[in-house]
Image (tube, rainbow, N blue to C red):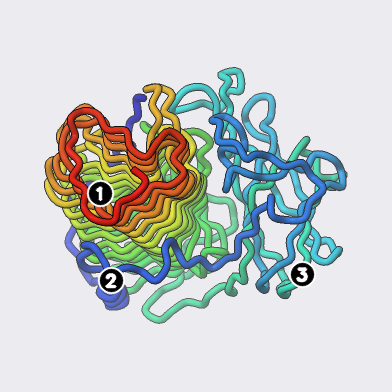
Amino acid sequence: MSRIKHRAPRTAATALTGALALTAALAAGQTGGAGSAAAAETRGAALPYTTYEAENGTTDAPAVGPDRTYLTPASEASGRKAVTLQETGSYVEFTLTQATNALNLRYSIPDSADGRGQDATLSVYADGTALTDLHLTSRYSWVYGQYPYTNNPSDGSGHRFFDETRALLGRTLPAGTVLRLQKDAADTAASYTIDLLEAEEAPAAAGMPSDYVSATDLGVTPDDGQDDTAALNDALARAKNDGKGLWLPAGTYTISDHVNLSGVALRGAGQWHTVLRGTGLKGGLYGQGGTSSVQDLMIDGDNTVRDDAGGQAAIEGDFGTGSVIKNVWIQHTKVGLWINAPTTGLHASDLRIRDTYADGVNLHGAVRNTVVSNSSIRGTGDDALAMWSDGGAATDNAFRGNTVQLPLLANGAAVYGGSGNSVEDNTITDTVTSAAGIAVSTRFGEPFSGTTTVARNTLARTGSYEPNWNAKLGALWVYADTSDITTPVVLSDNDVLDSTYSGLLVSYQKQVADLRVDHLKIDKAGHYGIEINAAGAGTFSGTTVTGAATGGLDLAGGFTVTRGAGNSGW
């Protein structure tokens, strides 16, 4: 498969002038060397919402799935299951277990005949009383043809079925409320495939903190439909010059190009209240060096197809030393975070990245000591989380404690070269095509130059078929492609559950010289438990395989296995 990673412009770091004490203190408390951390109490992100899977609700509608066949709606649904409301009066309902004033729905409706998308409503009831309808669209779902895909239905192979919509209810529903999603007569889509509902108690819009100045006092006007890009750039420059951060009150700010950050703090009233709204393929935050912070807002793009030449990421560029990105919701952009060298010590946390057309997060080039943690990444069009040593070695970075769901193409997490990087304490589920749950690979970028650690991750229903290669990719995939992997790859305390194909795949062109596997649990695999087709050597201890359809081990390519204690099933 030909896959071109998005290449953001390289911008020289600028000197920090008038650095904000607040930003520096925040960075000092949340950043620093990444390295490999002690085991977390739980795996995956601690998220503020409760998830209700449609197939577990009460419904009179037909089920979708389970099915992992590419180009079927079930293959892109959480748990590979959903329900479809087709008839007027059809419903799915849930009993809320927590108080709720905000909803986020993952759904699919049919596309329009011209591929430009159609809009529809879906009715919502609480204990039989009608609430505000949810507004749905197919504009940001449904792509066609071959990679990187089009909006033309005549190209066939339709997929990217699901999108998400959110709404504040204007009231709080107590625990125990029966919340119903129903197709009423005024809900005009031919069908509504419901994957899941997330419900939470969203906080009220926050007020302006000290040491900030309001954007509205510096000539920026939200909610007027006018382009705010130039006004925001001017306001940021003025705030920085005065030693202040820039505060974005609740509202929607339209942006058509980069909003530039160089040693400044940008903060909104909350993910549910302050929205930067992109236009066309553009509109996002661009780091130009210095220590910056971005917090408490949403970036909602207007991308409808992937465009590597013309599109912009939600947040990209050089973030200097010790920057912070926190509590940011990103949707409908080409990429979520595209972080360039020489960024060092960035901490990105508590993110929601949904429905991007390419990567969720990419640490690109010689990014160092950067952590992405406690974030939810779902429905990406390329790797959900990637470290790409392109033009320089990504070093001592970590993807830690994240929840990754349904990357529609490529891997849940991938490390392409570099030194001292780690993928730890994540949960990764339901990869769709051309994908592993976690890949350690020399397919892209520079060779590995130090230890790579994959520890304490849970992978469920991962691995997938790669149609361009006629290849069955494993849940864990160590892939020596363009160069040997000569430095240690440590796979420790990982659980692989219900893998679509092999639980662990080691391949292919070159050698994997020093693989170290300890306490790997493989429970149910559609192919082998462990499949190795490479030169090299590895040690295995505490590695157990149960329920592998084809057998516990397939060994080829001259690879030498050294068995320690505690292995079974292979």
Q: Which residue is mark 3?
A: 177
Q: Is residue 100 above or below residue 187?
A: below
Q: Between disc 3 and disc 2, whose residue precedes?
A: 2
What number is the disc on residue 27?
2
Q: CA distance from mark 2 to mark 1?
A: 18 Å
The residue drawn where x is 44% and y is 69% is 247
Q: CA distance from mark 1 to mark 3?
A: 46 Å
The residue drawn where x is 80% and y is 65% is 126
The residue drawn where x is 38% and y is 42% is 503
Q: Nearer the viewer, mark 1 or mark 3?
A: 3
Is residue 357 shown to the viewer in this render? no
Residues packed near mark 3 inside 10 Å, few (<14), some (14 to 19) or many (20 plus): some
In the picture, measured across the screen, residue 318 lies left or right of residue 500, that is: left
Q: Between disc 2 and disc 1, whose residue precedes?
A: 2
Residues packed near mark 2 inside 10 Å, few (<14), some (14 to 19) or many (20 plus): many
Where's residue 8, x and y in %? Answer: 30, 41
Q: Is residue 214 above or below residue 507?
A: below
Query: Residue type at mark 3?
Result: Thr
| Near-viewer residue (485 or 192) | 485
Is residue 200 shown to the viewer in this render? yes
Secondary structure found at label 1? strand
Q: How many marks?
A: 3
The residue drawn where x is 34% and y is 59% is 456
CB atoms at circles 2 and 1 under 8 Å apart? no
Where's residue 224, x and y in %? Answer: 59, 55
